[in-house]
Image: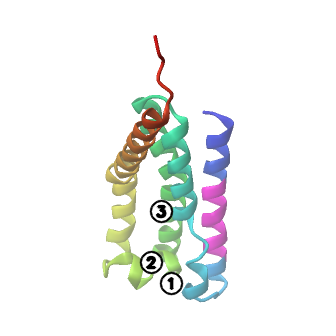
Amino acid sequence: MNRIMKVFIIAIALMGIVRFILSVSGVPNDVTKYFSMTAIMTIGSIYFAIATTTHKERFIAAYLLVLPYLTVEVIALGYTWATGRQTIFHAREYSFGTSIGVHTIGHLVGGLTWEPLTVFLIMEIIWGIYAGARSLFRPRATA
């Protein structure tokens, strides 16, 4: 794992911790929602879509970007499940009306399956657009 990936993993985890602390401290969800792990993951996805050279590297990067998000989500939902204390992680707009148990298990399953695969697909699309644009503007060799 390269240094830049470690920075993204730490940044996602730290943002999740900040989000959790704000939520349990009583900061309104309308403010807490701006402390976004997804925003950092999006920046990382764009970066690694362009910076990696193989599909396998992008696939691994997608999983590594989702892993800290998954970890924070499951721990925060576990906190809500264990204490009954509401946090932004199980707010109505994020839980789709499901129970805390279903929401937690959904994140666990989704975080290991379709979420990183979706990030990988988005990275592949970004890479395809970037590679196509690069080939359009690359000077052609003349013989």
Three-letter residue code for mark 3: Val
Distance from disc 3 to disc 2, alpha carbons, whole Å, reads: 11 Å
Left or right: residue 124 versus residue 141 is left
Three-letter residue code for mark 1: Gln
The residue located at (47%, 62%) in the rendering is 74
Counting from the top left corner in percent of width and height, residue 87 is at 53, 80
Three-letter residue code for mark 2: His
- Image position of 27 with respect to 127: above or below: below
Labels 3 and 2: the sequence-earlier one: 3
The residue tagged 1 is 86
| Front-most of residues 10 and 82 | 10
Question: Judging from the image, what secondary structure is the residue with disc 2 in?
Answer: helix
Q: Residue 74 carries which label?
A: 3
The residue located at (47%, 23%) in the rendering is 140
Question: Judging from the image, what secondary structure is the residue with disc 1 in?
Answer: loop
Asked if the residue at tag 1 contacts the one at tag 2, i.e. Cβ–Cβ closer than 8 Å, the answer is: yes
The residue tagged 2 is 90
Left or right: residue 29 versus residue 127 is right
Distance from disc 3 to disc 1, alpha carbons, whole Å, reads: 14 Å
- Image position of 143 with respect to 21: above or below: above
Residue 39 in magenta stretch = no
Counting from the top left corner in percent of width and height, residue 101 is at 35, 71
